[in-house]
Amino acid sequence: MLKFKSMIFILSLAAATVGCGSSDNGNAVTTVDTSETETETETDTSDSTSGNYNADLFDVLPLSEEQVSCTLENGTTTTCYELTFAANTVGDTEGEGTIGPYCPDSITTPRDEAGLGVYDGDTNPGFQSLVDAAQGMDADGYDIVDEDGNIRSGGGGDYSYCLSMPFDSSLTVTYLIPVTPEFRSEAYYIETVGSIGLGINGIPIKGDPPSVTTAEAGIGGTGSGNIPALDHCGGHADPAGYYHWHFIPQSINTVFESEEYDLTDLYGISCSNSYIEYEDPTAFAGLAKDGFPIYAAYDAVDAVPTDPNSVATVDECNGHSHATDEYSEGVYHYHALETGAPNVPVCLMGSFAERNDFSVQ
């Protein structure tokens, strides 16, 4: 994997409105016998630690980093990291070893050359190749496939479309992350396209992509009859032009290789972006907006991918507390879902900045 630690200088800034983004994991997943160890089933707030952000754990350095006063949504005034990164640090042009593919040309496009989508209609719903999703949509009355089998893309007409937005790499993305995480009294469930945090490349991580069939109040793009295209690492460009993920890419191949989807064996689909640690399903993946770390689907026990629930019981947000290679004194952290699609944590256990936890310029 290509890693770079140099600062990226932005030549111009464009104002934007935030809206709505083959590996062989051959190691067997093991479980750990905890029968002689008492496991805490409730979140222990004493594991809240100061300063979970560590630049050495990131593959891209921020353009700027400072600590500022901020107010959390629980009303607490505290100190936050204000981290600004260049947008689109994992690529902005489709090609081998970078982003893409996105919208397929037709229903005969090989699936490993087509993007992915989440269709929530009646015919063949779920996470799948856009080749299959388009045919399901068309069967449900969404006119997305023309009489020659071509898949409509781009939008702007009276049909349904596969959507793939242009990139604007002059943008910057800024995050407010509490230096000292504070646990909430109850979990906060992530809304559609809601901000979750940032990956180790400075890329935003978000909740579910917009629904094709159901309009949600205040959430743009939902219920439009159009389907957003995701690449093979689970990301795409926002209408504003910045790339973001709807998956934890470090373990999206675990989803592809699962019995439920089997997309790698059937079609050769895998995340292979050279900027991403796609071969390590135990990798540190980033920070949630509440300041707690995010990891890929498994814990590493003696370098072996291990079911997190057998290390310490996970909560409703797929999080738990224990020591990791990166946090030797122990830390509460989230895991990607093993086979969920999307595989991002469904909720957060910590408080986050009341306003502007994520912004784009």
Image: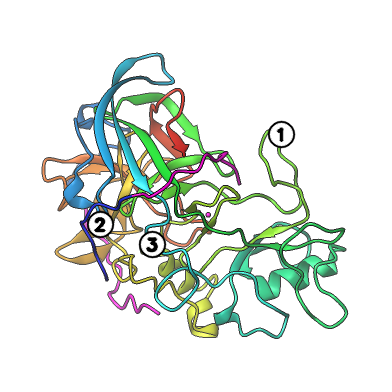
The residue lying at 43 percent from left, 79 percent from top is 96
Q: How far apart are marks 2 and 3 (CA)?
A: 10 Å
Q: Which amino acid does label 1 sit on?
A: Ala
Q: How crowded is mark 1: few (under 14 residues within 10 Å), some or many (20 or more)?
A: few
Q: Name the residue under label 3.
A: 90
User: Callout 3: helix, strand or loop?
Assistant: loop
- The magenta stretch spans residue 31: yes
The residue lying at 46 percent from left, 39 percent from top is 361
Would you say 302 lies left or right of 1 here? Answer: left
Q: Position of residue 222 (x, y in %)?
A: 71, 46
The relative height of residue 356 versus residue 129 in the rendered view (above or below) is above
User: Callout 1: helix, strand or loop?
Assistant: loop
Q: Position of residue 306 (x, y in %)?
A: 27, 62
Q: Magenta: predominant secondary structure element?
A: loop
The relative height of residue 321 versus residue 106 in the rendered view (above or below) is above
Q: What residue type is labelled 2?
A: Asp
Q: Where is residue 181 in the image (x, y as percent from the top left)?
A: 28, 29
Q: Which span is picked out in magenta?
A: 10-35
